[in-house]
Amino acid sequence: MAPVKVFGPAMSTNVARVLVCLEEVGAEYEVVNIDFQAMEHKSPEHLARNPFGQIPAFQDGDIVLFESRAIAKYVLRKYSKSAGVDLLREGDLKEAAMVDVWTEVEAHTYNPALSPVVYECLIYPAMRGVPTNQKVVEESLEKLKKVLDVYEARLSKHDYLAGDFLSFADLNHFPYTHYFMGTPHASLFDAYPHVKAWWERLAARPSVKKISANMPLKF
Amino acid sequence: MAMKVYGPAASTNVARVLVCLEEVGLDYELVPVDMTKGELKSPAHVSRNPFESRAISKYILRKGGSQLLREGNLSEAAMVDVWLEVESGHFDSAMSPIIFQCFVVPIFMGGTTDMKVVEENLEKLNKSLEVYEARLSKFKYLAGDFVSLADISHFPMAHYLLAGPHASVIDAYPHVKAWIADIMSRPSVKKVTELMEAAIRMN
């Protein structure tokens, strides 16, 4: 069986989202870089994979997908049984719902509060040579604190977000949080001991360590 | 015991949940939450949160044994997921500020529409609709030649688009226009659209 292909730079957060799931299920895969400088993401070849010209895109034989969360779920569904993992819990109505809920929370609440700090402190200075917009950072940190209050309460009751089992919901938090820990504001998590402990458990996973190795904090 | 849905029917997120309940024919009770009275932030409400409408919708469809998720088929389920993500990232993200400016600001907040925000988001919406047009020229529905949650999930925002001053934006995209008309004609969608309109009239 040919390895599946993931299109996009390995250091990209949304590519990493897919890669960490491939690692968790032990699937064989190949990362095919997309050169943004050369506008490769807008080439006809890439637009045929992702009509919005974004990364990642994914190919498994005849199946071509885009949108990192959709790709990741496909991977988890395809390989979970043979790998003996169950990160989606689709066999259990209630557990699957909790995985979905916290996956949505990451997408719509956690990420919008946390990612501007990553963009302002790491990405824009490195990629666009612009200084950090402190106002955006301050506003985002205020929102993030309110979000982390909710996470702290949740993680005081359960080891992981969807319950007492690791799931896709937890893994979704890894890529952007990894980069957040490279900003000057990483110590924000110190005020949320259960969140911090949860993050450290995630960061210690072999899959997360392996993918993090391609996500340098200085670039 | 009937399921309870908390929130105003006029909310796009609530409407999304209601249409799924209608699709599978499960009994439900709509418990209104008065957004103007700050009920959303009250401890009683927060403790029922966080619940996200897409997660709830999927729970309902699975419980009711619906075919709208295609979870028995790996590639079909993946396409449903892809277009649900597209809806969230490329449709709702542009529609939400437009609806906020054209409906919520003047009607619920007594303010004036910020046309700059509307223009910027109409531009984004047009770019997305080009992709939708290409897709719907090849397939009857977004995930393939079968209707799914990915299509139906668009209806609340589509309803407000059609009811607002920028409905004509879809005229340039004939396949998109036909697809929206198809979705809006589903019995479940018609029923919930009526609930949404009634809720707005009450304000």
Image (cartoon, coloured by chain):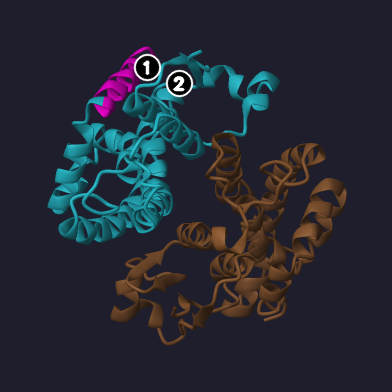
The letter of the brown chain is A
Instruction: Pinpoint residue B8: horizontal percent, then vertical percent.
Output: 45, 21
Name the element at disc 2. Answer: loop
Residue B159 visible, this orientation: yes
Q: In the picture, residue B95 is in which quadrant?
A: top left
Question: Which element carries disc 1, helix, strand or loop?
Answer: helix
Q: What residue is at 82 percent from the left and 53 percent from the top?
A: A196
Give the vertical position of A133 relative to A210 (above or below): above
For the residues beneath circles 1 and 2, the answer to whether they share a chain is: yes
Counting the numbered discs, the total is: 2
Classify residue A76 as left or right of residue B196.
Answer: right
Q: Which residue is mark 1?
A: B199
Q: Which residue is mark 2?
A: B8
Query: A75 and A192: which one is in front?
Result: A75
- Residue A193 image position (x, y, % from top left): 87, 48
Q: Residue at x 40, y 73 (%)?
A: A59
Q: Quadrant of residue A54?
A: bottom left
- How many C-alpha atoms fall within 10 Å of the one at disc 2: few (<14), some, or many (≥20)? many
Task: Report the Cα–Cα distance between label 1 and label 2.
Answer: 7 Å
Tell me whether circle 1 and circle 2 mark residues in contact (CB < 8 Å): yes
Residue A95 or A52: which is nearer the viewer? A95
Chain letter for mark 1: B
Write down the region rendered in magenta.
B188-203
Q: What is the chief secondary structure element of the magenta stretch?
A: helix
Indicate the chain coloured cyan by its letter: B
- Given the image, on which type of amino acid does mark 2 rest? Pro
Going by the image, does B190 lie left or right of A12? Answer: left
Coordinates of residue B38 in the picture (x, y in percent): 60, 21
